[in-house]
Image (tube, rainbow, N blue to C red):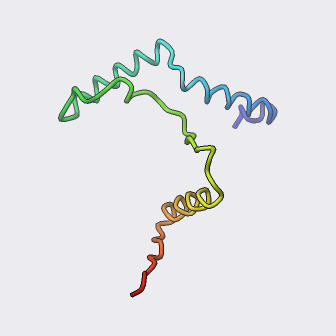
Amino acid sequence: MELMRSMTQREFEARMAWIEEEIDRPSREDWYLMQIAAEVCRTRVRNPQDVKLSDMKLRSGKQEVPQTMTKEEATARAKSCWFGMLGVGREKKHHGT
């Protein structure tokens, strides 16, 4: 909360954009911590050889959205997302019966 009061909205957005870019470029310490996390994970799974170092990499929260979506596709995607969050089932269309 104190951090938000100490900067302007533009500074805050610039900092968030910088953090978003930095999460995709792990530092030397990040790689070391990913190795430790992978080894801990390998002790707890049935097939330790399946645990990859890349599985431990933090990923940004934003989702890649294709730029070539039609309006109908975007609407269907949004509805699907909302239905899933609200736990609402879609109505099934009955064809001829």
38 shown above or below 63: above
Does residue 67 appear left or right of residue 80 in this picture? right
Q: Position of residue 88 (x, y in %)?
A: 48, 70
Does residue 39 appear left or right of residue 79 in this picture? left
Please state which of residues 57 and 36 is positioned toward the viewer in this rendering.
57
Quadrant location of residue 18?
A: top right
Please state which of residues 4 and 21 is positioned toward the viewer in this rendering.
21
Give the farthest residue toward the bottom: 97
Which image quarter holds the C terminus?
bottom left
Q: Position of residue 4 (x, y in %)?
A: 73, 35
Give the farthest residue toward the top: 28
Please state which of residues 54 and 72 is positioned toward the viewer in this rendering.
72
Give the total of numbered labels: 0
Quadrant location of residue 7?
A: top right
Residue at 58% of width from left, 44% of height from top?
A: 65
86 shown above or below 24: below
